[in-house]
Amino acid sequence: MTRQTGIIITVVLAVLVACPAIFCCVFGAISTTGQVPFEFNGQTTPIPSWIGVVLVCLSLIGILVPVASWFFLVRGKTA
């Protein structure tokens, strides 16, 4: 595999995995404050804080995927 192929794979992973993970991280950080309303059966309650913590942790894993792909596919290869 060439360096160019590794870069293409890393960019595709960044778009498909890291971008949604960043939005999930922001939503999870806002959810940890307990300010996000959730409506169920006509009753509005805030989303529990633990859901925000879980979203932040999962999104950090999603952000690490393109970094790991860059590390294994591109780093150290010469042009």
Image (cartoon, rainbow, N blue to C red):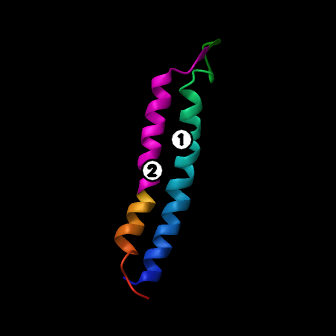
Q: Earlier in the sequence, mark 2 or mark 1?
A: 1
Residue 71: x percent and y percent?
37, 68
- Residue in the image at 36% along x and 78% along y: 76
Q: Which mark is residue 72?
A: none
- The amino acid sitting under disc 2 is Gly
Chain part drawn in magenta = 45-64
Above or below, comparing residue 38 to residue 72 in the picture: above
- The amino acid sitting under disc 1 is Cys
Residue 53 within the segment the image draws in magenta = yes
- Give the crowd class for mark 1: few <14, some 14-19, many >=20 residues within 10 Å: many
Tag 2 and tag 1, C-beta contact below 8 Å: no
Above or below, comparing residue 72 to residue 67 in the picture: below
The residues bearing labels 2 and 1 have C-alpha atoms spaced at a distance of 10 Å
Q: Quadrant of residue 70?
A: bottom left
Which residue position is annotated with label 1?
25
Which residue position is annotated with label 2?
62
